[in-house]
């Protein structure tokens, strides 16, 4: 059993599973889990551009299978718009949070709730200008958030961070978050932490043990939410992640782990 301190400033209890634990070990009772899964870099491989990702044909059926085993408590928590997510995993329509928590729905057929937060409208033009004047830098305009991708201009990383920091100095309601070859600009008050907390307040997630699976800097907010609630963090990385309960090497390993989980749940 887990002791989750009332004082949220304390470090979470150590996890029962070391970072080098076997992919076949599922601590506690997986039947009680609620899964929160990042998309890019976690369920699917990252591509050179956001629109170029390839969703494996077996992903939808696999997520549907695990979801049925967990009574629907499987959500995708992504930086993408929910409309973008839905188009990629159709006909599956899972519970989800989009734009790092700006959008959310607790059920696949539920209404999408949009967080009230400062918009990026005031800086959109300036950010577009930065991208347009630097070859290899691509602006992905998500409406309520902006992402500057520099995968094709990696030498621009520090310069971009400096320019965005200057720009946001007069917009305290906005925040820049670094990711894998991307700088995400979004409202400061929402994150994958708030997304998980919000989803855990409603069925089918209420009362379950949160397990967050992610690969990037923004996913660490999701890890924190899961660990604070006595749950687990599963990192997708080449090397073991110290704060994670389990580390999986790549999206293929994540899908394999989910398939093993479905079989384990099937036998209980």
Image (cartoon, rainbow, N blue to C red):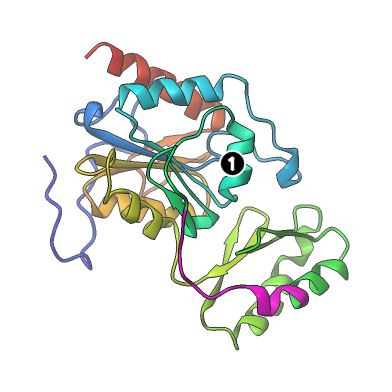
Q: Is residue 249 above or below residue 257?
A: below
Q: Which residue is mark 1?
A: 85
Q: Residue at x 34, y 31 (%)?
A: 72
The quadrant in which residue 123 appears is bottom right
SS type, badge 1 = helix
Give the percent coordinates (x, y) of residue 86. Answer: 58, 38
x, y percentage for residue 150?
Answer: 75, 58
**Is residue 253 or residue 33 the one in the foreground?**
33
Magenta stretch?
113-125
**Quarter holding residue 161:** bottom right
Residue 43 placement: quadrant: top right
Question: Residue 187: horizontal and vertical position, in percent?
Answer: 52, 70
Q: In the rendered view, does 89 fall on the left or right side of 223?
A: right
- On screen, residue 93 versus residue 234, left or right, reads right
Image quarter hosting the C terminus: top left
Position of residue 224 relative to residue 164, above or below, is above
């Amino acid at each position: 059993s887990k002791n989750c301190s009332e004082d949220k400033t304390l470090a979470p209890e150590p996890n029962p599973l070391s970072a080098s634990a076997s992919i076949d070990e599922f601590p506690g009772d997986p039947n009680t889990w609620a899964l929160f899964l990042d998309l890019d870099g976690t369920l699917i491989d990252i591509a050179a551009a956001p629109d170029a990702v390839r969703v494996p044909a077996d992903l939808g059926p696999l997520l549907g299978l695990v979801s049925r085993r967990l009574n629907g408590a499987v959500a995708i928590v992504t930086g993408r718009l929910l409309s973008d997510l839905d188009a990629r995993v159709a006909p599956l329509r899972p519970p989800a949070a989009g734009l790092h928590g700006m959008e959310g729905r607790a059920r696949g057929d539920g209404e999408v709730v949009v967080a009230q937060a400062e918009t990026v409208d005031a800086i959109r033009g300036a950010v577009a200008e930065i991208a347009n004047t630097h070859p290899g830098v691509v602006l992905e305009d998500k409406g309520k958030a902006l992402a500057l991708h520099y995968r094709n201009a990696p030498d621009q990383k520090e310069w971009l961070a400096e320019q965005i920091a200057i720009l946001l100095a007069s917009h305290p309601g906005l925040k820049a978050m670094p990711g894998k070859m991307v700088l995400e600009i979004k409202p400061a008050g929402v994150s994958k932490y708030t997304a998980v907390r919000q989803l855990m307040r409603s069925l089918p997630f209420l009362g379950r043990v949160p397990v967050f699976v992610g690969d990037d800097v923004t996913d660490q907010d999701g890890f924190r939410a899961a660990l604070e609630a006595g749950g687990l963090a599963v990192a997708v990385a080449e090397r073991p992640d110290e704060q994670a309960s389990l580390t999986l090497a790549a999206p293929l390993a994540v899908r394999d782990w989910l398939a093993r989980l479905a079989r384990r749940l099937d036998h209980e």
